[in-house]
Amino acid sequence: MIYLDYKDKRPIYEQIVEKFSDLIVKGVIVENEKMPSVRTLAMELSINPNTIQRAYQELERSGYIYSSAGKGSFVSPRSDFIRSRHTEVTERLKAALKEAIDVGVHREIIETIVNQYLEGSK
Amino acid sequence: MIYLDYKDKRPIYEQIVEKFSDLIVKGVIVENEKMPSVRTLAMELSINPNTIQRAYQELERSGYIYSSAGKGSFVSPRSDFIRSRHTEVTERLKAALKEAIDVGVHREIIETIVNQYLEGSK
Amino acid sequence: MIYLDYKDKRPIYEQIVEKFSDLIVKGVIVENEKMPSVRTLAMELSINPNTIQRAYQELERSGYIYSSAGKGSFVSPRSDFIRSRHTEVTERLKAALKEAIDVGVHREIIETIVNQYLEGSK
Amino acid sequence: MIYLDYKDKRPIYEQIVEKFSDLIVKGVIVENEKMPSVRTLAMELSINPNTIQRAYQELERSGYIYSSAGKGSFVSPRSDFIRSRHTEVTERLKAALKEAIDVGVHREIIETIVNQYLEGSK
DNA sequence: GTGGTCTAGACCACC
DNA sequence: GTGGTCTAGACCACG
């Protein structure tokens, strides 16, 4: 379900956060579905439970999951995080656009790229 | 000429690299212009010369500047780095677009954002 | 009669205690009225009877209910707990006021908030 | 500077967060002042550095301090956290008021308490 | 020296 | 069984 990339220089817990938030955003894991337990996932990835714990903690802070001791961790209802995710993503888009313009990429090139992606998503 | 942001989580040397690469890309510092010496810049920013040294190394590795022993560091000719910078920036733009679409941001919203920035740059 | 919030970080037994103590304080359940049996409530909420048991123990310890073996649990006479509940609640109010003042919230803002709530309760 | 209460059932890291946020809010520690290093504070309190780390991480997330590897942790400018602190504190006040009213504390008593504190702060 | 990450192993309350 | 906290000790990049 999840693979780690040890060549990636980002911390492991961050990779896990990214993987799961993706799965949740894309609807692969759905509302109120149970997340793998801290211990089992730790064994599966053969890393320390504390690292998983840290990742789950971040996922909870961002509203992707909720946990309750003794029961487990579960995926949050979509409405709880979808808004923040949108603004986060559009902020990144704005930054990328600003940088491209600053660096002097021609407007036509930017338009072409944007249109490609917008067409592809229809 | 350069200000440091201590609340920025990135290493200081990386901030310096970013600041100078920006200045160079935007043409504020031009081809073959002399970079401030490691020692004077270190004093100006009151940080360790090693940190400046490290930043200059990175700038050289990325092709933004070249150094000649005993004389100092100088800005590279534009053609040496401008292309790589462009592809780097457009890659980031593509990634941001893909993610926005994946997450389900409406096409109209993306178009509006893009147009805003393209208009602003005219 | 009672709903659980699984996103609440507090233990379930504590939520149950809070819900019932509220119902009792507000007079929804009255003196000497019988509490639902541990088993039926456990089934209704589909949780472990031990959890209900624990909640009832706490309620008894706090003086909200009393139980007699073989007969069930019953709501205590109001006078038994109402005083302690009042002091508890006013202590919390004092703490909140002190903190607001310490942090530097303007007196006018505090007054406005207080008046809003006092008006609303008329 | 900081004392731990081992009878307190809250986690240690949370106590530390509370102590420092108080010191910062009350201006005992001022803008850009250096926080004790993770290791020295750990030794002083004779607890594990990880626990301090966790506390500092929370303080940073809440905007009270900022940290940079290799340099240390520092108190944020007041403007960075004062707003969030105010809303947090007024929310707590509102909750306390609501509860007092729900439980049936007389309006006159609430008014008396509020006036006491408001007078005391003049 | 600093903060940040990770492991190994333990204990706790809750369910 | 679950998540949550804590300790002990290690390694890393940064300054």
Image (tube, coloured by chain):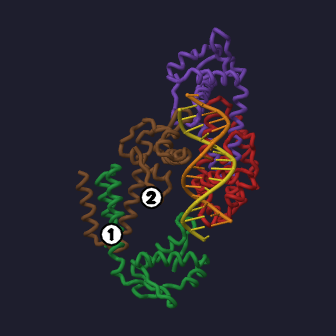
Chain colours: A red, B purple, C green, D brown, E yellow, F orange
- Amino acid at the residue labelled 2: Asp
- Amino acid at the residue labelled 1: Thr
Residue C87 numbered tag: 1
Q: Give me the chain letter of mark 2.
A: D
Q: Who's the residue at 74% across and 55% down the image?
A: A43
Q: Secondary structure at mark 2?
A: loop
Q: Who's the residue at 46% across and 38% down the image?
A: D35
Residue B108 numbered tag: none
Q: Position of residue B30 (x, y in %)?
A: 62, 17
In which quadrant will I find the C terminus of chain C?
bottom left
Foreground pick, C90 / D36: D36
Q: Position of residue B81 (x, y in %)?
A: 71, 24
**Cα distance between the residues tagged 2 and 1:** 21 Å
Q: Position of residue C95 (x, y in %)?
A: 34, 59
Residues packed near mark 1 inside 10 Å, few (<14), some (14 to 19) or many (20 plus): few
Residue D6 located left or right of residue B106: left
Residue receiving disc 2: D8
